[in-house]
Amino acid sequence: MTGDANAAIQALNRQYLQRHPLAAARQLEELAPETAAAMLGEMPQATLTRVFEQLPPSFAAALLPRFDDGPIIELMEATDPKAMVAILHQMEDDRAADYLQRVNPAVQKELNALRAYPENMAGSMMDPRVELFSETLTVDQVFKRLRQPGHRPKPTLFLQDDSHALTGQISLQSLVAARLDQPLHELKRPVAAFVEALTPQEEVVDLFEKYRFHSVPVVGMKGDLLGVIWQEALVRAVEEDATADMQAMVGASRDERALSKAAFAVRKRQPWLQINLVTAFLAAAVVGAFEDMIARFTALAVLLPVVAGQSGNTGAQALAVTMRGLAIREITTRQWARVVWKEAQAGFMNGIGVCATTCLGVYVWSQSIGLTGVIGVSMILSMVIAGIAGALVPIVLVRVGQDPATASSIILTTVTDVMGFFSFLGIATLFSGFL
Amino acid sequence: MTGDANAAIQALNRQYLQRHPLAAARQLEELAPETAAAMLGEMPQATLTRVFEQLPPSFAAALLPRFDDGPIIELMEATDPKAMVAILHQMEDDRAADYLQRVNPAVQKELNALRAYPENMAGSMMDPRVELFSETLTVDQVFKRLRQPGHRPKPTLFLQDDSHALTGQISLQSLVAARLDQPLHELKRPVAAFVEALTPQEEVVDLFEKYRFHSVPVVGMKGDLLGVIWQEALVRAVEEDATADMQAMVGASRDERALSKAAFAVRKRQPWLQINLVTAFLAAAVVGAFEDMIARFTALAVLLPVVAGQSGNTGAQALAVTMRGLAIREITTRQWARVVWKEAQAGFMNGIGVCATTCLGVYVWSQSIGLTGVIGVSMILSMVIAGIAGALVPIVLVRVGQDPATASSIILTTVTDVMGFFSFLGIATLFSGFL
């Protein structure tokens, strides 16, 4: 996709941009910012806006200065405020303030309000442009209002009483199924859950995971509606949260982003690296305990990475599969015995396969039947242990009330290294007469 | 949550079960099947159904035989067919066939049709109970029909012409905003994408990621509508797909489940373990090249796991953060230089911190300034290399047209092991006079 900007330009005709703004945005972001800005500049304003708000914020921020002044203002006013604020977050404060001064006061106020919420908080996920309906309206009156130009119906309607307090909600689906003369208060359902603007994204996702709402209202101190997090933003957050497990497993913060500052990454990762160091010393201590053996048979030292590599990978496979089962709620910790038994079997069977190749390789290299036997037996043993440990680590973490991802990979590596080295060097010591 | 079933029973009152079936299901699945079945048995049928279809299929399958015959049939007929089929998939074929015989012929036919689709295919994600609307109807006529009992409006309406071919779709939101006398064909939008029943779940997710549809129709050979995958199933699939990256990274199949058969796990994992073995031999060869050094200074062998552990963990952190950035489309491969530079810096700064602790530990243990200096320098060097490699591996995989997750962890470990051992043992050889 690198150089062939021309082919891309042909592929991206207006209709495509209009109909599939997200897909178009994905193709645009692979182009140089100048090229992308030139292409978008030729589009009608409505199309431009729809595509622009789907671009990654860092790329959109790079595009903005390349448009003319008039279109920039229109664009900033029409873009989904949530997306616009994410783009402003990518700029230096001075530059963002400069852009904000250009838009009309109402939008400026709205964007400034949203900008005040840190990223990864409910406030930055919400749509602040939500209409409230009086609960004394009838279904028919609501329909008439929604048919007027300028009302873009949303999947859920939020209701207020005379004092403007949020009193309930109605889905469009139940509105459509209702009698026309029914007043909304007869149809309303209580607002099942709401969050505050400073609720962390992770908690919003937990709520969504638990109740699968189609939208979550964000309320202020006095119970007033600040905005609504729609399903689209929820899905995005779910995805971000699911992939954050990978980071938590290896001791990187869930909050870290690919382009976070290096200092932020260091601050969050360093503690886990230090813990990992302690566990590495533990593994070294196991090797140290067999230092005499290694002095006599340096071949053992050469083969240490093989044992550690195989049991480490076997454990990592068991860990990944078990963690995912817990994350997508396919298993519960009650089923630990079945999972552990499966992983023990898989470790044993995989161990036999790996053992065969290893023994062949080690025999060719060392011509020693003793060494070959020792590594073969310890390979199977350590792979069974690795499988069991991989399944148990996340299950135990959940049982003691922890996130199953937290540093699970670091904990597991400790177990597989220590057990792998111990089984290999221990068996070698037992049978040292044959080496 | 183990023993306190009584507290749980009190917490789960009817209203809770009715309003929050998913949350209730999550609490029930932590109980013994007998207890859960007894509690659910006392609920009205509608509530029972809503909770039942939210349970993990394996747990629901364990509950089913504990209900009475009458309720079982009602339950099987009322449960979302997609969920019911997932439950039947958990049973032995004989038992599933036995249950299927009890329900009415229409439902039986429907369930059998769905059962024919393998899991992880579009057919098993769809809702087969979808009403088609003639495109000659007016908005007003549709509203009147939706208000009749037995029509549960869906978020999107699918349209057909006289020959029953699928011709377009209208969202409920645009229907509500339309004039009452407009015929549907004036409002319809083309069906932007559809899938076949045997389209793999992964491709459905790719489509959803690309276009963010709210629903995807599933069509048969002749373009006839078999069912619709609604947003809820899409969100579930997105989550399954996002977490599958963890498995792909370590060489387990994306299709493996926590309770897959051990033989399935072995078949899919064994090839990657064999590849990992080859790379482990590569690392062993590096150590082997320095066998003379190790014979003279066995302390080097003892410290090998420390170097490998730290560079491995540093690389894994960089890999996880970069992979996630690519997965949630926060960065593109064009930004590789920024990401690599960030990870190189992070590796260097983390290296200094880790180096300090390591040097202290190694000096206390060995009393050798030479050894301490060697491990300190090689630690920083190998952690910088690990950070760069961790960022580059997924970016290069994407650039050569691969899934960035595929075996990325195995590839990375090879690099970090080989470079870690080489830098440590190489520097030790250069400065062997000081050891």
Image: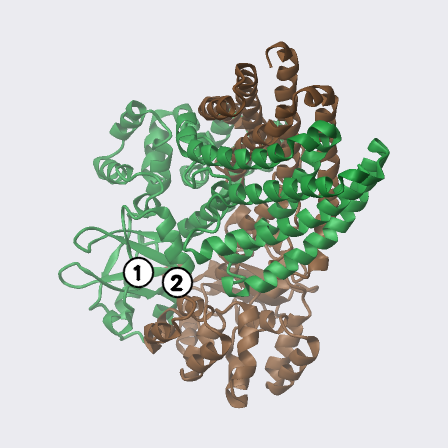
Chain colours: A brown, B green
| Chain under numbered label 1 | B
Q: Residue at x 45, y 63 (%)?
A: A155
Please state the horizontal and vertical placement of residue A35, each as a whole percent of the image: 45, 78
- Return the residue nearer the eye: B22 or A192: B22
Please state the horizontal and vertical placement of residue B374, each as a whole percent of the image: 76, 42
| Chain under numbered label 2 | B
- Quarter location, residue A409: top right
B373 relative to A331 in the view: left or right = right
- Quarter location, residue B364: top right
Element assignment for label 2: helix
Q: Earlier in the sequence, mark 2 or mark 1?
A: 1
B212 relative to A404 in the view: left or right = left
Q: Residue at x 68, y 34 (%)?
A: B305
Q: Which residue is mark 2?
A: B211
| Quadrant position of the N terminus of chain B in the picture | top right
- Identify the amino acid type marked 2: Tyr
Q: Which of the numbered marks, if any, corresponds to residue A387?
A: none
- Return the residue nearer the eye: B73 or A4: A4
Q: Would you say the residues marked 2 and 1 are in contact, meaning their CB atoms lie under 8 Å apart?
A: yes
Q: Residue furthest left?
A: B163
Q: Residue furthest front?
A: B433
Number of marks in the image?
A: 2
Q: Which of the numbered marks, if any, corresponds to residue B193?
A: 1
Element assignment for label 1: loop
Q: Residue at x 38, y 25 (%)?
A: B68
Please state the horizontal and vertical placement of residue A345, each as a whole percent of the image: 47, 22
Where is A317 relative to A185, above or below? above
- Return the residue nearer the eye: A194 or A177: A194
- Identify the amino acid type marked 1: Ala
- Return the residue nearer the eye: B237 or B309: B309
